[in-house]
Image (cartoon, grey):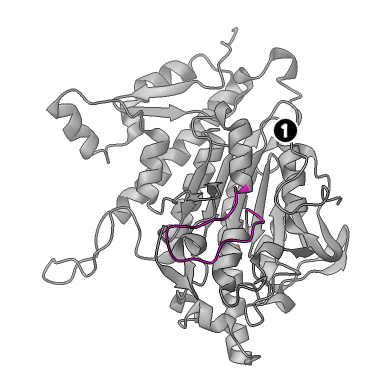
């Protein structure tokens, strides 16, 4: 039986839904179906930021180059070590005070993806720089439904004083379209899901509006006929891939539906109030957002994505892991053994969420590898030691294979004050973005 060739932009359509599909053999040129390489498969750029620095003694690997051992905090990534690149010695000069005094948290958030030194103001005259994700989005964003996605677990602000005279816009946004326009992030996984799978079409009658409002009848049910018709035209390998993908969509949707139910007391009244779709439990919220990231990348809905696990300077506590105190306060540990131990717990807990995402991507076959191999996921902070507020020797790692361009894992040490933007410039090149400089870069980072 001769199977039909498919466009990369093929979608399953149902009432008010458009379900993008993962990369399949039927979408590849015939000559590359069995040998899709780096040039045939898109490379994704993902930037994850954590606040308040890292406890560095439990972060820095033992050994250098390809011969290294992950330190205690990175143990959640041990099974993924073949995709791990750790960078020591990178610096974010834009986050230093340069005569502006206190405000390291705001500056580190603002500078993390821009390399710029933000203007110290809590008024409307904010000034930063374009972020690396938006440089990539401007170059390759036309190839996908969304040029970029901006996500997080806490809301974005565009005004207010959040850190020693610095605007809240600096500490709660990673992505900057230009020097005065931060891009607010979405924190509701239900809203992300609807954005990924809703067509945006106007619904013509009351019955359809009712069906979409009560849409916990799965979007897959709306598109089931289209899915079955497509499946009959696919080869065996693509049929399996379609089944696995649709299962992942339905599973994510079912988990979202469960979070819409408010906890109630004996009188049947809600015990708390929250926006619909945002789980009360932090880890469940984070995992659902990681699911949304995986779906967005899997469907090639975007190739550029940013995610903040918390806003910079976050005071969130983590009682579920025995660290109920403010994360920010713990980062100012003053060499207290108890505070440092709790800080390590938080750092490891955050990395478990990264591992959860990476493990999903590693299971998704794509081209001659998997989705993790075809991604570059930067994870780190614009502060090194939270107690010192230093911006050199930053905790930065990258997961993924950059489409096969990174052959082996490694721990790479660089001279003091090597710009973090050198790494970003290298990443832009791997994604096919032509750039001579970015931020305060001096050259393309050479590693591996």
Q: Is residue 192 visible?
A: yes
Q: Main secondary structure of the magenta part?
A: loop
Q: What is the magenta range? A: 114-131
**Badge 1, how many Cα within 10 Å: few under 14, some, many 20+?**
some
Taking 133 as reference, is 14 left or right?
Answer: left
134 or 192, which is in the foreground? 134
Image coords of residue 226 (percent x, y): 39, 19
Measured as percent of width and height from the top left, residue 245 is found at 50, 35
Q: Relative to residue 78, is residue 31 depicted above or below? A: above
Figure quadrant of residue 127? bottom right
Write the residue at 39% across / 38% down.
Answer: 195
Q: Secondary structure at mark 1?
A: loop
Q: Quadrant of residue 68?
A: bottom right
Residue at horizontal 51 percent and vertical 61 percent from the top: 170
Is residue 118 one of those drawn in magenta? yes
State which quarter of the image contains the N terminus.
top right
Q: Quadrant of residue 23?
A: top right
Q: Which residue appears at 53% of the width and 35% of the height?
A: 147
Q: Is 85 left or right of 295, judged from the image as shown? A: right
Give whichever of 291, 242 is nearer the camera.
291
- Residue farthest top in this picture: 2
16 or 104: nearer the viewer: 104
Task: Determine which residue is flagged by label 1.
Answer: 432
The answer to whether 443 is drawn above or below residue 411 in the figure is above
In the rendered image, residue 277 lying in the magenta stretch gets the answer no
Residue lying furthest left in this view?
Answer: 267
Position of 127 compared to 200: left or right? right
**Image: 39 above or below 249:** above
Q: Residue at x 13, y 28 (%)?
A: 206
Instruction: Using the image, determine if residue 82 lies above or below residue 107.
Output: above
């Amino acid at each position: 039986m001769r199977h039909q060739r498919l466009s990369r932009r093929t979608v399953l359509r149902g009432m008010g839904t458009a379900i993008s599909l993962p990369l399949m053999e039927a979408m590849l040129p015939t000559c590359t179906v069995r040998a899709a390489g780096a040039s045939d498969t898109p490379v994704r750029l993902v930037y994850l930021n954590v606040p308040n620095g890292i406890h560095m003694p439990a972060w820095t690997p033992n050994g250098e180059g390809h011969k290294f051992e992950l330190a205690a905090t990175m143990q959640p990534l041990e099974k993924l070590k073949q995709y791990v690149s750790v960078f020591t010695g990178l610096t974010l000069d834009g986050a230093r005070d340069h005569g502006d005094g206190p405000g390291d948290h705001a500056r580190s958030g603002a500078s993390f993806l821009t390399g710029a030194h933000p203007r110290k103001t809590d008024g409307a005259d904010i000034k930063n720089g374009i972020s690396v994700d938006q440089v990539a989005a401007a170059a390759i964003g036309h190839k996908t439904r969304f040029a970029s996605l901006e996500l997080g677990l806490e809301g974005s602000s565009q005004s207010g004083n959040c850190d020693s005279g610095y605007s809240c816009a600096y500490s709660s946004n990673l992505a900057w379209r230009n020097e005065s326009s931060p891009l607010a992030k979405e924190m509701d996984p239900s809203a992300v899901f609807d954005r990924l799978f809703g067509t945006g079409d106007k619904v013509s009658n009351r019955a359809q509006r009712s069906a979409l409002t009560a849409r916990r009848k799965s979007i897959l049910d709306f598109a089931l006929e289209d899915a079955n018709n497509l499946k009959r035209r696919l080869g065996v390998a693509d049929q399996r891939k379609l089944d696995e993908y649709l299962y992942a969509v339905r599973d994510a949707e079912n988990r979202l539906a469960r979070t819409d139910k408010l906890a109630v007391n004996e009188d049947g009244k809600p015990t708390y109030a929250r926006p619909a779709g945002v789980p009360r439990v932090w880890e469940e919220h984070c995992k659902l957002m990681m699911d949304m990231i995986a779906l967005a990348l899997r469907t090639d809905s975007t190739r550029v994505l940013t995610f903040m696990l918390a806003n910079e300077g976050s005071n969130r506590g983590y009682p579920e892991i025995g660290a109920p105190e403010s994360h920010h306060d713990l980062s100012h540990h003053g060499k207290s053994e108890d505070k440092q131990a709790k800080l390590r717990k938080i750092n490891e807990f955050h990395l478990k969420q990264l591992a959860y995402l990476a493990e999903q991507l590693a299971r998704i076959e794509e081209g001659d590898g998997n989705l993790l191999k075809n991604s570059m996921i930067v994870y780190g902070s614009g502060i090194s030691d939270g107690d010192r507020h230093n911006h050199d020797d930053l905790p930065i790692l990258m997961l993924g294979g950059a489409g096969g361009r990174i052959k082996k894992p490694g721990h790479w040490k660089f001279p003091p004050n090597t710009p973090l933007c050198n790494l970003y410039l290298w990443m832009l090149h791997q994604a096919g973005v032509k750039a001579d400089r970015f931020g305060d870069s001096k050259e393309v980072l050479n590693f591996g």
